[in-house]
Image (cartoon, helix red, strand yellow):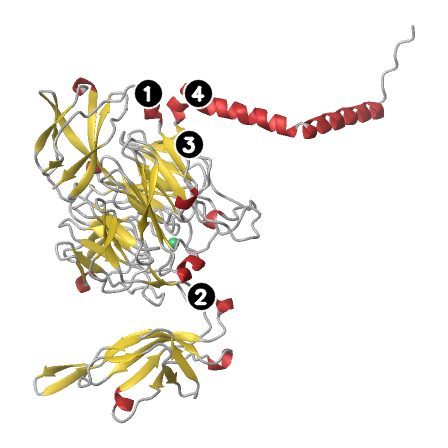
Amino acid sequence: MNPRPRPTATRRLLSGFVSLLVLTVLVVVNRPMVAFGAEALHEFQINRLSYTQRYGHWSRLPVPENFRVNAIHAALLRTGKVLIIAGSGNNRDNFEAGTFRTVLFDPANDEFTEVPTPTDVFCAGHTFLASGKLLIAGGTKSYEVLEKDIDHPAGVMKIKNESAAGGPRFFPKGTRLTGRNGLAYLTRADVTVPAATTMKHGDAVMTHAGEAEVWVDAERAGDAAIVRAPGQYALAGLTGADRRNLYGLSDKITREKQEYGGDDTSYEFDPITERYQRTGDMVQPRWYPTLAETPNGDVLAVSGLDGFGRMLPGDNERYLTEQRRWVDAPKLKRVFPTYPALHLMQDGRLFFSGSNSGYGSDTEGRTPGLWDLTNNKFQVVPGLPDARMTETSSSVLLPPAQDQKVMIFGGGEIGESPVSTRRTAIADLDEPKPAYRPGPDLPQPARYLSTVLLPDDTVLTTGGSSGYRGGEYRGQTRSDLFNTQIYDPSGNRFADAADSTIGRNYHSEAILLPDGRVITMGSDPLYDPTGRNPGTFEQRIEVYSPPYLYKGDRPTIDGGPAAVQRGTTVTFATADAAGIRAARLMRPSAVTHVTDVDQRSVALDITTAPGGLALSIPKERGLVPSGWYLLYLIDAEGVPSTGRWVQVR
Ligand SMILES: [Cu+2]
């Protein structure tokens, strides 16, 4: 028998190619089966108890069609319901139609309800008051207008009134002003100009002109009506002395982009009636302000764009909670970028972590530091690595609040820059000369990372994207991050958690629910997955169950007071007293644009008491500001009870 000849190299190559071809055809034909198999295996793996005990578990929340909204703001009310605010939801059609949305989600029964929304609170600021009401101030008065859409040059006209005698003067929308160039400009809205005021300085009487600002648009389209120098404008229809006393002043009238304009409305959202209650208006209209609680229970509104889309030059204001009205805070003039993260510290100072979102000076007001509200002094906190990458970063007061450590996570360069960072850093503000020190890096560079304090003293970090608004990053068209990790301050390291299944970038939120789960919502990508068409707002909601929910029985809180005083010791009933390792008071989240200065976790000293545990409430207001908190008892395995609402006075 002749031995079979060895195939030539060419033949071998050819037969290998044929096998590969056959295999490829088989795989392609059966692709759905292969994919289905891989998916089923993945499903099986992520649902195993050994997996969920280590990494936790994500699930989708079924949201009825009519409750799907663009979640821009989220807060946990003391009823346990989640307030989800869209306002116009960054949608021009909604804005022009006056369609503003707010919904409530009750995690106890998965039910949604609609809340009437009186004005466009999109991009307002918010914080909880001692009463448990959510103060919501500012919002959107006008949408941006892009350069390409501007045919008629426009600008801000200041209308002056030099006369004290005639009282305030009203000019309807469409009032004409004529410039030295002989061209006409029309007011975009009604405007009332206050009368001049007079003041006596010795023998001399000083007159201070009244003034009001309004947008004007050139009557005529095209570049001819552009004005780039300050000038005076004559108001049509005036006679006699009015012609001298009333006039317009404008710095420039151009076809440049018009930014979003802020609103001055302010509300307290009542968790019991579930309605917005109007308060006094703000002194300044604000778009993208931060509302920061101060130790006496009043609130400071900081930064923002004004009614004409201009950065407020360090003008901040104070909400007098007792009087439900806003007043100017001229002694607290200080420049910050929009949505600055201002954390209330034990000594009553506000720590600006550096985190911010949106707009601001390139050079001024971006340095982290401690702001003393008693004298407007600012102590710089140095040492932040990647100091230019604080925009769209997030920061938290690490648990427990007594440690007085603030951690900053990720962030990007100013504006639409594609550059972002993996950096985290921690400032120990208890030190005499506090400074940032590097923390462990995030797995990927991240903007818009959601950071949520958990009852077991860890911090869940989830979502975000490496690129601007989920877009292009290092050659990839989309850059949403699905990896989730849990930071443990005691070991100063991240542990991997289960992957989320929905990308969350700009305009997304995550907050702790009373039962210890975390809800995530929102995301406003600039582009669709192809990177060529505009993106659509993400309206699906996910819920993450941390590993501690898979470790068996949870301790219970069986009874206790509904309200407690700072500096006192109070007894809560529990059958699990012997196994309890820690007790925490957690202030609920109120978050937008990854800015959440409300959430904090305060440690309570524990002693045994008949039928339960005696818990000591710290006495410092800067540590435990008045308000509603969730009380958690945590056992030796790190398993928390369900939160129980307690009002701290
Ligand atoms: Cu925004």
Q: Is residue 166 above or below residue 151?
A: below
Q: Pointers 2 and 4 in contact (CB under 8 A)? A: no
**Relative height, residue 182 to residue 218 (above, below):** below
Residue 283 in percent (x, y) is at 22, 64
On the image, numbered disc 4 is attached to which residue? 48
Task: Check residue 59 in the rendering and tell me which mark sits there, or answer none.
Answer: 3
The answer to whether one can see residue 439 in this image is: no
Name which residue lies at 26% across and 60% down: 265
Where is residue 412 drawn, in percent x and y? 42, 49
Left or right relative to 100: residue 244 = left
Q: Nearer the viewer, mark 2 or mark 3?
A: 3
Quarter of the picture holding the C terminus:
top left
Amino acid at dot 1: Lys
Secondary structure under tag 3 reads: strand
The residue pinned by badge 2 equals 145
* Cβ atoms at labels 3 and 1 below 8 Å apart: no
Residue at image mark 1: 551
Helix, strand, or loop for circle 2?
loop
Q: Residue furthest bottom?
A: 240
Earlier in the chain: of badge 2 and badge 4, it is: 4
Asked whether, in this view, residue 573 is left or right of residue 52, the answer is: left
Q: Amino acid at mark 4?
A: Arg
Identify the secondary structure beneath mark 1.
Answer: loop
Residue 236 lies left or right of residue 148; in this view the side is left
User: How many neighbours does mark 4 have within 10 angstroms: few (below 14), some (14-19), or many (20 or more)?
Assistant: few
Amino acid type at circle 3 is: Ser
Q: CA distance from mark 1 to mark 2?
A: 53 Å
Q: Earlier in the sequence, mark 3 or mark 1?
A: 3
| CA–CA distance in space, label 2 to label 4 | 51 Å
Q: Is residue 577 above or below residue 408?
A: above
For the residues marked 3 and 1, what is the alpha-carbon distance in whole angstroms?
Answer: 18 Å
